[in-house]
Amino acid sequence: MPPLTRTTEQRNPRTVDIDLWPTARIVAAVLTEDTAAVQAALEAAPTLAEAVDRALDRLAKGGRVHYFGAGASGRLAVLDATEVTPTFGAPPGLFTAHYPGGADALVDPSLDHEDAYGLAYDDASVLTAHDVAVGVTASGTTQYVAGALDRARSAGALTVLITCDGGSPLAADITVVAATGPEAVTGSTRLKAGTATKVLLNAFSTALMVRSGRTYSNLMVNVVATNEKLNARAVTIVAMATGLDEASSAAALSEAGGEVPVAVLHALSSKAAAECRNALRAAGSVRAALTLLGTLDGR
């Protein structure tokens, strides 16, 4: 696709005089464009929900999610994949982001491998038929993403394309389009397209983890507490889930060996921590474990 036909590369008529504007007007214009990006992402919600449901089926069979992207899109994918484990207690490797050139290229934009179709084809060799390959490209033309999706398709993996250009030539089982249009600064897809990509990735991974039972109500009970702030959050989550005061919540957490889901089950069911841990292992989620323990839903 010639660059000038990509909607993300076209000139924005609303900002042609941006270099003549005062600071306040520039800031307001960029933020106004971003609000349109979120709306564009929202309009893609039904298709994204389909991607989540089909990915859920793959994960239930032992599959994993693999993101593939370059440039700003790829960096956003790395961010999303990195945050899944500490937020939801997902096992390492459940979400993996592949970035062309690896860690060095991630922080050095001069190491540009966006056109590396063959590199992506090799990176995607780890995929199986149970996995999910998510290609992330604002323009919808990134060859690194094309190579990954082609290899994923040959492996029988579910393929999902997240893009901001509905005219993308890339093939996928599900194509999620946030039609963000021209940028405030022409072609700078780290702006509006980046915003839409970020919220779509947020929604995809969050919905997938919620549907996998990795929250209780809207509480991130599987949070991995690695610092003082998160240790305090763990106590707060137990208190919110159970109605206990802070001291009692901390005691329940201690009894559970620091495991928030077990602490919640222990407090709500009055069962021993070991029994709660076994119920959680068998049921797969706090809500299902409460039923297994013969306890009414504790919201």
Image (spheres, grey):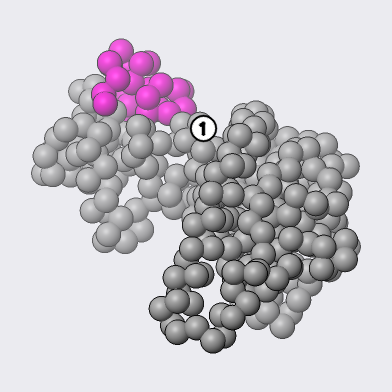
- Left or right for 176, reference 242: right
- Whether 293 is among the magenta residues is yes
The magenta segment is 271-299
User: Measuring 88% from the left and 42% from the top, which residue is drawn there?
Assistant: 154
Residue beneath disc 1:
212
User: Measuring 74% from the left and 60% from the top, which residue is drawn there?
Assistant: 7
Q: Name the one closer to the observer, 55 or 221.
A: 55
What secondary structure predominates along the stretch shown in magenta? helix
Q: Is residue 262 visible?
A: yes
Q: Is residue 189 visible?
A: no
Mark 1 packing: few (<14 Cα in 10 Å), some, or many (20+)?
Answer: some
Q: Quadrant of residue 44?
A: top right
- Left or right for 94, reference 148: left
Q: Quadrant of the N terminus?
A: bottom right
The residue under label 1 is which amino acid type?
Answer: Ser
Spot occupied by residue 250 in the image (x, y as percentages of width and height): 18, 44
Spot occupied by residue 241 in the image (x, y as percentages of width and height): 25, 34
